[in-house]
Image (cartoon, rainbow, N blue to C red):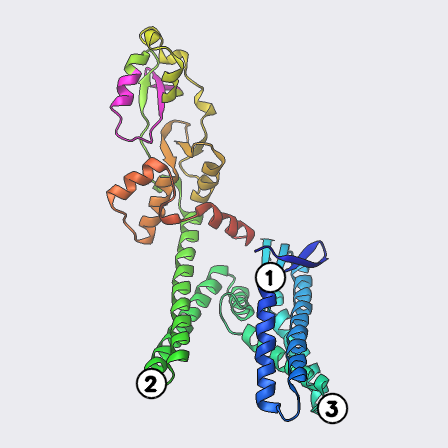
Amino acid sequence: MRSWQIFKIWGIPFKVHPYWFVILFLFSWSISNQVNLSSGDIYNIKEAWIIGFLTSFFLLSSIISHEVLHIFVSLNQGVKIKKITFYFLGAILQIDKYCQTALGNIKIAIVRPLFCFVTAFILLFISNNSVSQELISINIISRVGILNLFLGFLNLIPIGSLDGGKLLKSIIWHFSGSKNKGRNFLNKVNLFLSFSVLIFGIICLFRFNFYYGFILSFLGLFGVNSAKSESQFLKIEKILKFSKVSELKLKPLRKIEFDSNFSELNKLIKNKKDESDKYFFVTNNGRWTGYIDENILKTVSIKKWERNFIGDFKKPIDSFERVYINDKLWKIVERIEETKEGFILVLNATDIPLGIVDRSKIGNFVLIKLGFNLPSEIVKKLNYKNQYPLGINLPRIINSMKQKGDL
């Protein structure tokens, strides 16, 4: 569903997702029921609904104001934000560029929980010093203050997606000088907390309350899977950043002499073992002089196949997309995505062609590095389709690494 823009600050659109209104109603209904149960002798049903709705509304308003301050600090630390969408108790930022310093990330991570605590302190101070605690306005102020206090502590939990996790990661980065140390430590903390919640949830499931035990078990299992996925992403990023083309198993070049005719080319095409192969590289007495696409057969009449020679139709080898054997793997992925066919020629330091690399070769190399060995049948299918295996989106991972300043 499409989000609705509520305002625009510093060129950044602030949007609200339509689901927010459903949650706003449910939250208002929940608070009004709580008021009826705890203070039904003080407030009638209408007043309970007013308290519920205004508490929810002002809670959202405080979240938006905190987010505006968070955006202000983020922009001052070099973050480039495309848009922000609110989902009631939080927001999702679409970021084009992340902060590149540990201290800057610490400032960004601390600002939201800090202002939650400041808001809570001011509101609770007003409510506690009020003459009457039974006034509707004071009841609302007190509830919004308590909820802000809850959000402040919630945001400080050291989980990756929360400010507490980002703060912990950035502090370790600041004192160790290594961003990856912070990410690895945070991931271990997330895994430990998730296992703890999972075990506690299983105990609750069989010993105490089935409903709460089921929810805790589900959350713990989700956290464990998320931590494992993050661990895999860290490994993939390391492979892309430090591995070289020389570590890949290249696809051998198919050779053909420049004075071969089209009938000889046709025989070679019929006998090929890999259906994804479509290029032949032309040689002249051992020297590489160019290349042709096997589809060239369709452009020449069969009657002329004996009289037409490959050397007359070759393209310059310099026009083929190429990389060098010592180039980093992440650069090769970028180059491949810029090509139409997804094939790149690999050269050595003296510009001599060594082989071809494609998406399937890179993807299979990454999987082997991760400890996965796919069956040969699946590898053959991937080679034919020239795709990254198992849905691994390497270009997206590289783009994320660039946004974070890891490349």
Tell me the quarter of the image containing the N terminus: bottom right
Q: Badges 2 and 1: C-beta atoms under 8 Å apart? A: no
Disc on the earlier residue, 3 or 2 = 3
> Where is residue 232 drawn, in percent x and y?
39, 57
Whether residue 98 is visible to the viewer of this picture, yes or no, is no
Q: In the image, residue 90 lies at what x, y percent?
A: 59, 67
Identify which amino acid the numbered label 3 is placed on. Answer: Ser
Q: How far apart are marks 3 and 2 (CA)?
A: 44 Å
- Badge number at residue 147: none
Given residues 246 and 16, the one toward you in this image is 16
The residue that label 1 is drawn on is 18
Of residues 108 and 176, the one nearer the viewer is 108
For residue 265, what is the image quadrant?
top left
273 falls in the magenta region: yes
The residue under the point 39% across, 48% down is 391
Q: How far apart are marks 1 and 3 (CA)?
A: 37 Å
| Residue 207, numbered label | 2
Position of residue 78 measured from the top left corner of the image (x, y, whole percent): 65, 56
Would residue 361 be seen by someone viewing this image from the given angle? Answer: yes
- Identify the secondary structure beneath mark 1: loop
Magenta stretch?
265-290
Circle 3 packing at 10 Å, graded few (<14), some (14-19), many (20+), is few
Left or right for 397, reference 252: right
Residue count near mark 1 (Cα–Cα under 10 Å), binned few <14, some 14–19, many ≥20: some
Q: Rate crowding at label 2 as few (under 14), some (14 to 19) or many (20 or more) other CA atoms within 10 Å.
A: few
Q: How far apart are marks 2 and 1 (CA)?
A: 39 Å
| Helix, strand or loop under label 2 | helix
Q: Which amino acid does label 2 sit on?
A: Arg
Q: Label 3, on which residue?
A: 130
Amino acid type at mark 1: Pro
Question: Against 318, is 326 above or below?
Answer: below
